[in-house]
Amino acid sequence: MPRRAASKYHNRKAARITAAGNILEFDSQKEARRYDELALLLAAEKIRDLKLQPEYTLQEAYTTLEGVRVRAIRYRADFSYERATEPDCCGEVHWLRVVEDVKSEATKTRVYAIKRKLMRERLGIDVREV
């Protein structure tokens, strides 16, 4: 029986079943464990608006003067959600957007580093590494 090729970063895929019965597939065990943590925080109403694999456009597609089409540059994070702040001086709680990416040393590539910097510079979003 042929052996399966090892993944590029030696990770093992994982799956989770939601309360609604949907199957979620994750690229790594670490990412699945982080989803479990976020699902608990969501259930406890510590976070809200949890999104998996949100995509951000860092640069729109365009066509050069020579007619060459240049594709858009996009960044896909692992998770995004809103977390509550501590109450301010007036007692109001504000919700802040958090964008997370589950990373290991092997997955901190040059391309990832560039896109992370572009997220901060172009969109004002700091990507939180987990």
Image (cartoon, rainbow, N blue to C red):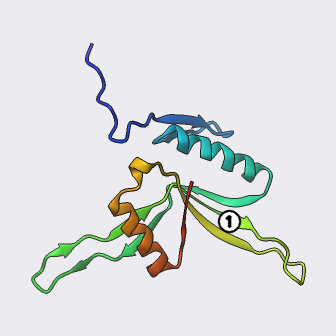
- In the foreground, 72 or 30: 30
Q: Which quadrant of the figure has residue 128?
A: bottom right
Write the residue at 77% across / 58% down: 46
Write the residue at 54% across / 41% down: 30
Image mark count = 1
Write the residue at 53% across / 74% down: 125
Q: Kindly give the residue lying farthest to the front in the view shown.
A: 105
Write the residue at 56% across / 41% down: 32
Q: Is residue 26 above or below residue 61?
A: above
Q: Is residue 50 left or right of residue 117?
A: right
Quarter that holds the N terminus: top left
Dot 1: element: strand
Q: Is residue 80 left or right of residue 8?
A: right
Return the x and y of residue 27 as percentages of the image width and height.
45, 42
Q: Is residue 92 above or below residue 37?
A: below
- In the foreground, 12 or 72: 12
Q: Which residue is mark 1?
A: 82
Mark 1 crowdedness (10 Å alpha carbons): few <14, some 14-19, many ≥20: some
Return the x and y of residue 11 as percentages of the image width and height.
43, 37
Q: Is residue 34 above or below residue 100?
A: above
- In the foreground, 70 or 84: 84
Q: Kindly give the residue lying farthest to the top in the view shown.
A: 1
Return the x and y of residue 24 as percentages of the image width and height.
54, 41
- Residue type at tag 1: Glu
